[in-house]
């Protein structure tokens, strides 16, 4: 095993140095803090809710910027302040759930606030899985149980069983449902991995209880931890429905869905295309990133290679390994790339695997289209050809895809306006505004958003100033919102 090397080694730290390092890790409060600020201040007008995307856009910029963190951890860091931060983050997630339920006991499903649950609260809940991940790897039982409780808030408690006893044992092998294969698209991976991980966790529990062929009605099934998790998390969902109604339940389910989508996007790029060549897990079996924001804002998740090689190591002690393949951005930027531009992710990842001679480019690997060994100067064009040979072929276009783009967009926008209008009329009992007036209002809102987005793009293209373009766009949105409020009595 070769030793870790970095561009800058961190020496032992003084108490003041430890305090400064801990203060950097307080960046981890950023994402849950934004979600709580959004929830505390709700309900919001339709033109106010989108303003809470500004901090998330800033996080994306920071994560995709040039600032890197490659220093090795100091050898004498005390554990307690870093542990305290993890416990605080766990508490914040429970608070996020409480505030989500509170807000949507008075706010409707067909509101911009519900869209922000998808964009903001779901992001915070996805972040909470990182906290849960840190806790379930601890040795103390109560910390593991706290991690399991966090996983229940996103309806994914079986991750505790599958991740510890499945993924960490089988990572980089065909038997691991959480390892994305070379050429596999994210959507295909998501459809495959979610049910496969649940099945795997259930099998692992049956094996733990002494019988891999145990029937569901066997009395020992009552000791199945996956069953316990399912009962607790869905019991929580039913309690929310009984106490706060269907809208609160919908918001709870939506944040859980987004959290799982984010988790599996992370699983996807953390091991995409890598094949374990040795019995022991090595740093080359996971992808790393050197993003400053990911390391401090996502409690060390950037150093995933060291985590898999030494799973019990706490986040503040994770090391950099130069031999691990490196992602082009931090985790926030990578999630957007994987979900929004998956072809671009696969192209960049293929290039990096070729450079590092890993996955299908490792000597002796039997992968369609991959040579036994690539020379360092191999061209990007050749790598793209290899990827094209191994990537799954897209299906033929259906009737929807054959329609002109403008027609598809018009039908989608019209459908959104119609559904939103019917939904609000149903929620309010059509007492506040007539159907035609409500339809006109929603068309105006959608047109306002479309105009603001178009103007922002034009300003950025003309000036090259992204911050200026966003400032002008949100300022215009606020003006349009105030004008619509003034015009509402005329529609009523």
Image (cartoon, grey):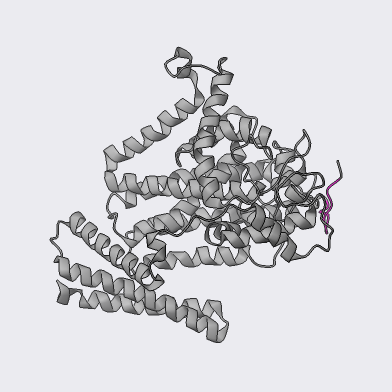
Q: Residue at x 81, y 49 (%)?
A: 372
Which picture quadrant has residue 36?
A: bottom left
Q: Is residue 76 above or below residue 112?
A: above
Q: Residue furthest top?
A: 219
Residue stretch in magenta: 3-11
Tell me if residue 204 comes above or below residue 368 in the rendering.
above
Residue 119, located in which quarter of the rendered image?
A: bottom left
Nearest the viewer among 198 and 319 is 198
Residue 380 pos. (x, y %): 74, 65
Q: Position of residue 382 (x, y in %)?
A: 74, 62
In which quarter of the view is residue 426 placed? Answer: bottom left
Left or right of residue 332, residue 72 in this image? right
Q: Is residue 71 visible?
A: no
Question: Which residue lies most toward the right here?
Answer: 2
**Which residue is nearer to you in this view: 120 or 284?**
284
Query: Residue 97, image x and y in percent?
Result: 41, 46
At a point 64% along the width and 53% down the height, the residue shown is 25
Q: How many marks?
A: 0
The reply to whether the magenta stretch includes residue 109 is no
Q: Which x, y percent locates residue 1?
A: 86, 40
Magenta highlight: main SS: loop
- The residue depicted at 54 percent of the width and 30 percent of the height is 201
Q: Quadrant of the C terminus?
A: bottom left
Residue situated furthest front in the rendering: 396
């Amino acid at each position: 095993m070769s030793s870790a090397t970095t561009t800058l080694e961190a020496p032992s730290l003084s108490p003041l140095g430890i305090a400064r390092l801990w203060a950097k890790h307080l960046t981890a409060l950023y994402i849950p803090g934004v979600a709580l600020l959004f929830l505390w201040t709700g309900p919001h007008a339709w033109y106010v809710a989108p303003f809470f995307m500004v901090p998330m856009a800033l996080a994306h910029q920071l994560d995709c910027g040039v600032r890197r963190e490659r220093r090795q951890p100091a050898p004498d860091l005390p554990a307690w302040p870093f542990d305290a931060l993890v416990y605080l983050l766990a508490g914040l997630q429970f608070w996020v759930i409480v505030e989500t339920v509170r807000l949507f006991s008075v706010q409707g499903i067909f509101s911009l606030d519900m869209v922000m649950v998808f964009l903001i609260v779901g992001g915070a809940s996805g972040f909470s899985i990182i906290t849960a991940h840190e806790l379930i790897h601890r040795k103390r039982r109560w910390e593991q149980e706290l991690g399991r409780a966090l996983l229940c808030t996103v309806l994914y408690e079986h991750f505790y069983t599958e991740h510890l006893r499945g993924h960490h044992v089988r990572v980089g092998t065909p038997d691991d449902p959480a390892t994305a294969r070379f050429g596999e698209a994210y959507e295909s991976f998501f459809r495959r991995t979610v049910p496969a991980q649940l099945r795997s966790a259930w099998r692992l529990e049956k094996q733990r209880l002494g019988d891999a062929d145990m029937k569901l009605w066997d009395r020992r099934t009552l000791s199945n931890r996956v069953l316990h998790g399912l009962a607790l998390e869905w019991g929580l969902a039913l309690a929310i429905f009984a106490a706060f109604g269907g809208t609160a339940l919908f918001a709870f389910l939506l944040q859980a869905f987004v959290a799982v989508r984010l988790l599996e996007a992370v699983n996807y790029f953390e091991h995409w295309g890598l094949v374990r060549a040795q019995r022991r897990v090595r740093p080359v079996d996971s992808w790393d990133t050197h993003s400053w924001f990911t390391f401090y804002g996502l409690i060390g998740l950037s150093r995933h290679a060291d985590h898999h090689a030494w799973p019990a190591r706490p986040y503040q002690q994770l090391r950099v390994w130069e031999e691990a393949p490196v992602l082009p951005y931090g985790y926030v930027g990578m999630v957007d790339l994987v979900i929004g531009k998956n072809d671009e992710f696969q192209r960049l990842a293929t290039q990096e695997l070729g450079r590092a001679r890993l996955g299908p480019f490792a000597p002796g690997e039997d992968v369609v289209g991959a040579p036994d060994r690539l020379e360092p100067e191999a061209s990007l064009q050749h790598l793209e050809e290899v990827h094209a040979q191994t990537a799954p072929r897209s299906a033929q276009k259906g009737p929807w895809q054959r329609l002109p783009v403008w027609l598809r967009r018009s039908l989608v926008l019209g459908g959104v306006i119609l559904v939103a209008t019917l939904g609000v009329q149903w929620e309010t009992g059509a007492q506040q505004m007539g159907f035609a007036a409500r339809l006109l209002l929603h068309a105006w809102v959608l047109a306002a958003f479309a105009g603001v987005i178009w103007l922002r793009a034009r300003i950025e293209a003309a000036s090259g100033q992204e911050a200026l373009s966003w400032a002008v766009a949100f300022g215009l949105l606020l003006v349009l919102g105030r004008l619509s409020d003034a015009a509402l009595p005329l529609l009523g």
